[in-house]
Each structure stands twice: as structure tokens, then as C-alpha cells.
Image (cartoon, rainbow, N blue to C red):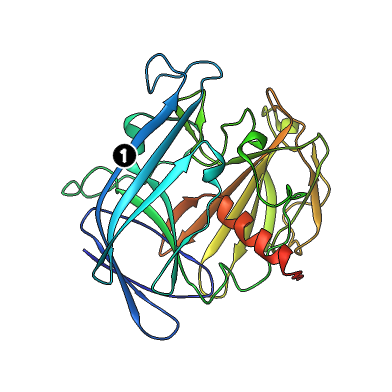
């Protein structure tokens, strides 16, 4: 299948099958082509007695890869999850930033009991049950969105480290209890740590609240971009909101005190990132947002 996309102001998210060809029209009008050839995943280390079976405080580090052909040249893209290599820079291939977000093969030894992060199921019976790989793309000359992204929380120096991700495992897709892919990014910080809007939001609200009997306070902020893409950012474990719900929120505004409700072993805030792109809701690694935050912070950008 040929999947046409045109570079826009925000990054492009998509999930594809083996054999699919992505034709990505760049800002300069040239078409960048990527065909997905193969994917795979493997365990690098684990404390589990049986791979894929959760154990309390189990630890697993794994890798996954995609074999692709870009503009006729072969490339192997490989990610490591559960170590500091989880916080990676995108590949730059022929003028395109390329993030390999997930492959379905990793769920041969991982469960999905700790928030959704697996690739989407297919409605057509003639196709495999799930797509094989998830990517994000952007013209290398453009940012992931047209505005600076401000710090969502106090940024750890230099880069996020895996030891700050709950018990040292809860990065995006990280192996909670050694065998369940984590559907977000946890960052440990003290109860009451202030959370600020990294971008302008059109609307924001609690979708779970302890006041309504839930075990957690969970929040979403929505942003409709001019190119038609919608971003949904979410946080969990907040002590309280500091702004009224269902109102726009300007970038840089403190909206909550984080890290204090239903946190388990360590005070932390859970961060999530979902993109509505070409009619599909696609969950992505929040690290992509933080990657841009670090770049903007280093360049001294402000909204």
C-alpha cells in the first residue's frame, strides 16, 4: 500500500504494515520515500523467571528494530528500551527526522496491562490483525510544532535518565514488573511539583478525579493546530488543579501540583502524548515532546 503524506507544521504520526510505502512530501516539494521491510524485537536482559510473565519489581531491558528502505537505500533502525538509550535523538535521513516509536513484535514477550501503547487493530479481515510499526516524521528543517515547547515540569539536567522513571523502568514502553509495556513516561519528583502547560491549549480538564471516586487525578489538555492535527497531552497523579477546567490555557501557565496521588513506590507524574492525525488517534512517546523542550530550553526560546 502507498501511504501519501505531506509535511505540515506539526510532526506526522503513522502506523504501517510490512511492505507499505510512505511517500512524504517535504517542504521543498521533494518526495521522501520509505518502505517498511521487516520488524523484530528481542530481550537484552531480564530478572524474570519466565519472559513475558510479570513479577513484582521485575526488570527487563529490550530492543526492537525496523528494516526500511529509504529512497532506495537500506537502513536498520534500532531502539533500546529500559535504559538511558530510551531517550534518543531521531534519525536524520535525507532531510527528514525519523522517530521509530514502536513495533508490534515487542508484544510477543510484553503485555499491555499498564496503559495502552500497542499498535492499532485493523478493521479489515484481509489485513494482519495489527500494523507492524509506528513512526513519527518531520522535515529536518522544521520543529515538531510551530511554537516553542516550554518545560512541562522542572527538567532534569541535560536529559531524562532511566533511574528517574518510577523504579527505573517506566519510560515509554518500559517493562513495568518486567513484562508490561508502560503507556506513558513517568518522571520522579517531589509531591507538589508544579506542572506547567508546555503549549497553548484550547481546552483542558480532569477526566478522572478522586473527588468523583476515582483512585487518581488524571488530566487532559487539547490543542487543535492550524494544519488540522490535534494533540492531546495528559498527566496523572496530580495533587490538585490550580486552574478552572474547560477553559483555554496559555503556554507556561502552572495548571497543577503533581506527583502526589496513587503514586506507588515513588512520587512521580505520568506524562502521555496522543496525536489525532489523518483520522487516527496515535499514541506516541512523550519523550518526543521533551526532546523538543530540551532543544528549545538550550536555545532560550520563549512563547
Q: Nearer the viewer, residue 215 or 55?
A: 55
Residue drawn at 40 percent across, 19 percent down: 53
Q: Nearer the viewer, residue 261 or 105?
A: 105
In this picture, residue 191 sits left or right of residue 9:
right
Compared with 20, 38 (above or below) is above
Residue 143 horizontal/vertical position (percent): 57, 71
Compared with 199, 165 (above or below) is above
Residue 226 horizontal/vertical position (percent): 56, 75
In this picture, residue 165 sits left or right of residue 239:
left
Point out the residue furthest to the left here: 126
Residue 233 horizontal/vertical position (percent): 61, 52
Point out the residue furthest to the top here: 49
Residue 254 horizontal/vertical position (percent): 82, 53
Quarter of the view holding residue 111: top left
Compared with 30, 229 (above or below) is above
Q: Which residue is mark 1?
A: 105
Residue drawn at 75 percent across, 38 percent down: 238
Q: Quadrant of the N terminus?
A: bottom left
Quarter of the view holding residue 7: bottom left
Q: Quadrant of the C terminus?
A: bottom right
Residue drawn at 38 percent across, 52 percent down: 134
Considering the numbered disc 1 on the image, is that residue within a helix, a strand or a loop? helix
- Mark 1 crowd level (few <14, some 14–19, many ≥20, 10 Å Cα): some
Amino acid at each position: 500500500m502507498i501511504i501519501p503524506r505531506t509535511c505540515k507544521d506539526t510532526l506526522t504520526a503513522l502506523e504501517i504494515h510490512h511492505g507499505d510505502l510512505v511517500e512524504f512530501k517535504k517542504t521543498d516539494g521533494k518526495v521522501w520515500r520509505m518502505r517498511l521491510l521487516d520488524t523484530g524485537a528481542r530481550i537484552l536482559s531480564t530478572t524474570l523467571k519466565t519472559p513475558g510473565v510479570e513479577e513484582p519489581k521485575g526488570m527487563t531491558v529490550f530492543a526492537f528494530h525496523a528494516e526500511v528502505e529509504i529512497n532506495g537505500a537500506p537502513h536498520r533502525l534500532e531502539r533500546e528500551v529500559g535504559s538511558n538509550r530510551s531517550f534518543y535523538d531521531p534519525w536524520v535521513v535525507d532531510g527528514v527526522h525519523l522517530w521509530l516509536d514502536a513495533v508490534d513484535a515487542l508484544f510477543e514477550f510484553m503485555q499491555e496491562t499498564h496503559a495502552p501503547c500497542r499498535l492499532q487493530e485493523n478493521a479489515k479481515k484481509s489485513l494482519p490483525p495489527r500494523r507492524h510499526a509506528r513512526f513519527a516524521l518531520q522535515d529536518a528543517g522544521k520543529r515538531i510544532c510551530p511554537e516553542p515547547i516550554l518545560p512541562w515540569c522542572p527538567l532534569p539536567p541535560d536529559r531524562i535518565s532511566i533511574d528517574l522513571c518510577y523504579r527505573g523502568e517506566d519510560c515509554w514502553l518500559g517493562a513495568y514488573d518486567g513484562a508490561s509495556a508502560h503507556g506513558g513516561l513517568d518522571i520522579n519528583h517531589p509531591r507538589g511539583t508544579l506542572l506547567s502547560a508546555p503549549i497553548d491549549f484550547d481546552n483542558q480538564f480532569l477526566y478522572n478525579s478522586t473527588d468523583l471516586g476515582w483512585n487518581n487525578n488524571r488530566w487532559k489538555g487539547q490543542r487543535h493546530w492550524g494544519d488540522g492535527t490535534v494533540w492531546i497531552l495528559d498527566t496523572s497523579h496530580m495533587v490538585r488543579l490550580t486552574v478552572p477546567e474547560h477553559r483555554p490555557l496559555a503556554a507556561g501557565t502552572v495548571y497543577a501540583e503533581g506527583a502526589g496521588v496513587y503514586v506507588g513506590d515513588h512520587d512521580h507524574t505520568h506524562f502521555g502524548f496522543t496525536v489525532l492525525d489523518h483520522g487516527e488517534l496515535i499514541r506516541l512517546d512523550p519523550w518526543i515532546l521533551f526532546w523538543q523542550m530540551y532543544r528549545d530550553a538550550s536555545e532560550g526560546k520563549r512563547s
